[in-house]
Amino acid sequence: MSEAAVVIIGSGLAGYNVARELRKLDAQVPIVVISRDQAGFYSKPMLSNALAGKKTAATLVMKAADKMASEIQAQVLPHSIVSQIDTQAQTVTLTGGQVITYRDLVLATGADPIRIPLEGDAVKQVLSVNDLEDFALFAEALDTAAGGQPARKVAILGAGLIGCEFANDLLARSIEPTVIDLSDRVLNRLLPPVASARLQSSLEQAGARFRFGVGLQRVDRRADGPGLTLTLSDGSTLEADLVLSAIGLRPRAALATVAGIQVNRGIVVNRQLATSAPHIYAVGDCAEVDGLNLPYVLPLMTQARALAATLTGKPTDVVYPAMPVVVKTPAQPTVICPPPAGAAGDWQVNETDDALEARFTSPADPAQLLGFVLQGKAVSQRQAWAAQAPALLS
């Protein structure tokens, strides 16, 4: 390429959506997408409800890398890993030695699963599902974990959003999930207690089990047959065919750190998604925008549109309206619009047999909706409630 390109590191929803939005605004600028995997386009949020939809790793891919390259008129480099960013020369170097010059660089590197230290001879059999390749390994393990037979029992570490979604999804395969968490209830950081209880009860009625106030310490192969023995922090044990860790994500920022780019919880960017290094931006799960790291689809879509405008010469601040999160738990449909971090207030709950409405309001202004939770039939009101909630970044 004779003209320096806009180089995007990462081919997830964030990276590909920046490329798509940029191509809409500029038909000529060279675009290079660097992917450490097969670079097919798929929706990562679909991974936690793929079993119910009878999806495989292959069928989750909506468009292969060559189709994406054609669609966005870009060079897509699958199975390529960036080893170095030179912020002075404006180049990235791949592990194979190839050097690519960038006009602007977009870091869309995503996040890594948080790993907790464990003991035992089967620690390496603890899986996480964070991308398509992870899901392929998980699906294969589900088919063979019980001594070559399909898994019957799966232990899930973490009763947060992803843990509950996977628990619900495993039930669709008639697999009994046991969810383990140090906290005292499901989604304890996002839901008021009554909504947590409602979600937990619905999952339990569908066949899930929960162990709260304990953590996992050891994972060992069973001595008397196939499967695993899990030792919990209270000394009790639990039998399972497979262990899935879903305790959270950590922004993937090592590449930025080595390049001298400012990193806090995530890669620090301003409202125009610019990092501390000239001509380098960050989007998606790896980015910390004005102190906010939001690993959800709606924020990254908003970021992609704003950054595309900035990259075409129209500096644009990212704006976050209220963005409710849909929890993929059909056993108890749930929508969450969290109040701002640190906001003072109380939950006001209205509950019926088939619906729950919870409003988070400030004592200083009870009429102002700061956040909300909807469950059951009430989830149909998501848009109307979102219109009343304050913007996260205005």
Image (cartoon, helix red, strand yellow):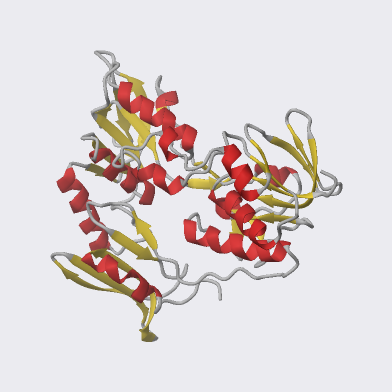
Examine the image and state in which quarter residue 172 appears: top left
Q: Position of residue 29 (x, y in %)?
A: 75, 54
Residue nearer the viewer, 84 or 4:
4
In the image, residue 232 sits, relative to residue 333, either above or below, namely above
Please give left or right for residue 174 compared with residue 298 in the image: left
Q: Disc count in the image?
A: 0
Residue nearer the viewer, 78 or 332:
78
In the image, residue 294 sits, relative to residue 16, either above or below, namely below
Examine the image and state in which quarter residue 38 appears: top right
Residue nearer the viewer, 200 or 19:
19
Q: Is residue 266 visible?
A: no
Query: What residue sits 31% from the left and 42% below the top?
Result: 53
Report the residue that reaches farthest toward the left. 353
In the image, residue 348 sits, relative to residue 188, either above or below, namely below
Q: Position of residue 46 (x, y in %)?
A: 40, 46
Q: Quadrant of the N terminus?
A: top right
Please give left or right for residue 322 compared with residue 261 in the image: left
Q: Is residue 375 visible?
A: yes
Q: Quadrant of the C terminus?
A: bottom right
Query: What residue sits 73% from the left and 64% below the top?
Result: 312
Please give left or right for residue 246 compared with residue 64 in the image: left
Q: Position of residue 225 (x, y in %)?
A: 25, 14
Q: Position of residue 47 (x, y in %)?
A: 40, 42
Query: What residue sits 63% from the left and 65% below the top?
Result: 306
Residue nearer the viewer, 344 or 58:
58
